[in-house]
Image (cartoon, rainbow, N blue to C red):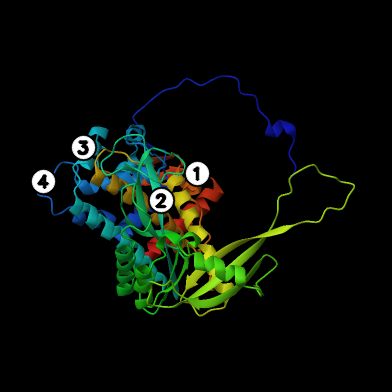
């Protein structure tokens, strides 16, 4: 129905007088869905068990500090000092079960007093929450990707060192090794390391532990893994092969001149598509005992033309090739193996989302254990946002060659803008606690959907 201009436009000139009152107003009405999720997974109770070995019992226990940090990251804040901006929010207080939030100095002191046993228990909890979701979904195939990611700091935090740092050269950093699950876009586990180690440092034991933990709980599933050239070693490949894990790994050309000779002697390449072609062979380095399947691929690229352009003349296009070698124990076609291995780029998107939206790149304290706890909180906040969306929609029934995520996930920052960061008022009409929000139909639909699926999952 068409309406007149006068019915749509209005003139507002007066600026209202600002008045501050102590009322039950919240800026994060959408936290209600996470309150239901926390209750369903018993997060507070399980966090308490992570620190029950400590003899001291401060007013704000370690489990409350960790839970506050998870909520802090879910709300979109990165620095500890920003807690002051919502310390009177009634919905945050109800979610944590507190009458008031601890001071920033209390949180900093608690992080500085964290110890390795509490870190390991919290790490185990983070991993177990992801595995519980995998058991619920009963996925026929799981793809675990492994790669390192840099966390930089301008300070001198304990355990940091100057090493590989592409964006901030010369800065001290951690270089943690992460394990992610391609199907759910979640973090499974991490190996926290200083910034001056090679990507493969401690990788064989870490990879073995990740697969052993998942295989203990998740049955009747095909396990796969993808890795870059830093993990190319007989030890790592034999660990995966002995556990019946189907893997692909990039092969470093610089270490094996024989590969260059094999490519130069090759005359016939089989076509995959217009850009890619391949051939394969059984091969092993001289120092290895086991022979694996090596797939040699090349990609046709246009050669850049340098010099003045003569538009009135016909100039032929020259092409050059980029070469890549992949080792695998998969028996599928070479095309599917190449697509599968190229799909590991999705892990970079997980790192990017977690650093942008879940503060994965923040190093808040000078103590190693405190920084490890904060990194695990960032991982858990990212995983919980994925878990909520997994409950709300079904998975794609068929796996694609590149193994993309089985759900169409929204970023955590998108969830904040659409649902979490909504104003509301807490009242108790007729002694019934009520959260009143604006009558936006889209927000109402999404919020009630998430509340309903969390309630059904309980």
Q: Which numbered disc covers residue 417? A: 1
Between the C-alphas of marks 1 and 4, the distance is 40 Å
Of the numbered discs 4 and 2, the one sitting upstream in the chain is 4
Q: Residue at x 24, y 37 (%)?
A: 108
Question: In what element is the residue under mark 1?
Answer: helix
Q: Nearer the viewer, residue 66 or 262?
A: 262
Q: Nearer the viewer, mark 1 or mark 4?
A: 4
Question: In what element is the residue under mark 3?
Answer: helix
Q: Which residue is mark 4?
A: 56
Q: Residue at x 48, y 54 (%)?
A: 348
How crowded is the residue under tag 2: few (<14 C-alpha within 10 Å), some, or many (20+)? Answer: many
Please state the horizontal and vertical placement of residue 294, each as a whole percent of the image: 51, 73
Between the C-alphas of marks 3 and 2, the distance is 27 Å
Of the numbered discs 1 and 3, the one sitting upstream in the chain is 3
Question: In what element is the residue under mark 2?
Answer: strand
Question: In what element is the residue under mark 4?
Answer: loop
Look at the numbered discs 4 and 2 and tell me whether their residues touch, using CB distance below 8 Å.
no
Q: Which residue is mark 3?
A: 109
């Amino acid at each position: 129905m068409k309406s007149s201009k006068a019915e749509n436009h209005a003139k507002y000139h007066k600026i209202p007088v600002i008045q501050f009152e102590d009322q039950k107003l919240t800026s994060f009405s959408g936290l209600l869905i996470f309150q239901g999720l926390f209750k369903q997974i018993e997060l507070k109770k399980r966090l308490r068990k992570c620190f029950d070995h400590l003899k001291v019992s401060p007013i704000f226990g370690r489990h409350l500090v960790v839970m506050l940090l998870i909520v802090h990251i879910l709300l979109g804040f990165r620095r500890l000092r920003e807690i002051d901006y919502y310390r009177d929010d009634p919905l945050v207080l109800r979610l944590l079960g507190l009458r008031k939030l601890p001071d920033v100095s209390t949180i900093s002191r608690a992080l500085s007093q964290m110890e390795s046993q509490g870190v390991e228990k919290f790490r185990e909890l983070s991993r177990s929450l992801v595995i519980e979701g995998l058991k619920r979904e009963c996925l026929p195939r799981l793809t675990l990707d492994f790669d390192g990611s840099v966390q930089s700091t301008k300070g001198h935090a304990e355990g940091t060192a100057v090493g590989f740092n592409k964006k901030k050269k010369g800065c001290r950093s951690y270089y943690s090794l992460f394990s992610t699950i391609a199907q759910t876009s979640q973090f499974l586990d991490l190996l926290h390391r200083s910034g001056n180690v090679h990507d493969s440092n401690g990788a064989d034991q870490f990879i073995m532990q990740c697969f052993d933990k998942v295989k203990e709980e998740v049955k009747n599933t095909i396990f796969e893994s993808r890795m870059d050239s830093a993990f190319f070693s007989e030890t790592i490949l034999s660990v995966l092969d002995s556990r019946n894990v189907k893997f692909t790994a990039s092969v470093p050309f610089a270490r094996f001149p024989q590969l260059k000779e094999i490519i130069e002697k090759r005359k016939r390449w089989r076509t995959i598509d217009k850009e890619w072609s391949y051939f394969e062979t059984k091969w092993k380095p001289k120092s290895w005992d086991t022979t694996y399947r090596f797939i040699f691929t090349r990609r046709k690229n246009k050669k850049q033309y340098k010099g003045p352009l003569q538009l009135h003349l016909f100039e032929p296009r020259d092409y050059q090739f980029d070469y890549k070698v992949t080792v695998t124990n998969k028996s599928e076609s070479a095309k599917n193996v190449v697509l599968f291995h190229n799909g590991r780029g999705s892990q970079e998107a997980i790192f990017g989302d977690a650093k942008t939206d879940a503060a994965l790149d923040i190093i808040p304290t000078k103590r190693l254990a405190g920084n490890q706890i904060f990194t695990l909180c960032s991982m858990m906040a990212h995983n919980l946002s994925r878990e909520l969306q997994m409950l709300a929609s079904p998975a794609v029934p068929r796996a694609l060659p590149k193994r993309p995520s089985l759900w169409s996930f929204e970023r955590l920052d998108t969830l904040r803008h659409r649902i979490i960061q909504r104003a509301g008022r807490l009242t108790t009409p007729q002694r019934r606690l009520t959260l009143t929000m604006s009558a936006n139909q889209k927000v109402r639909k999404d919020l009630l959907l998430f509340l309903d699926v969390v309630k059904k999952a309980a």
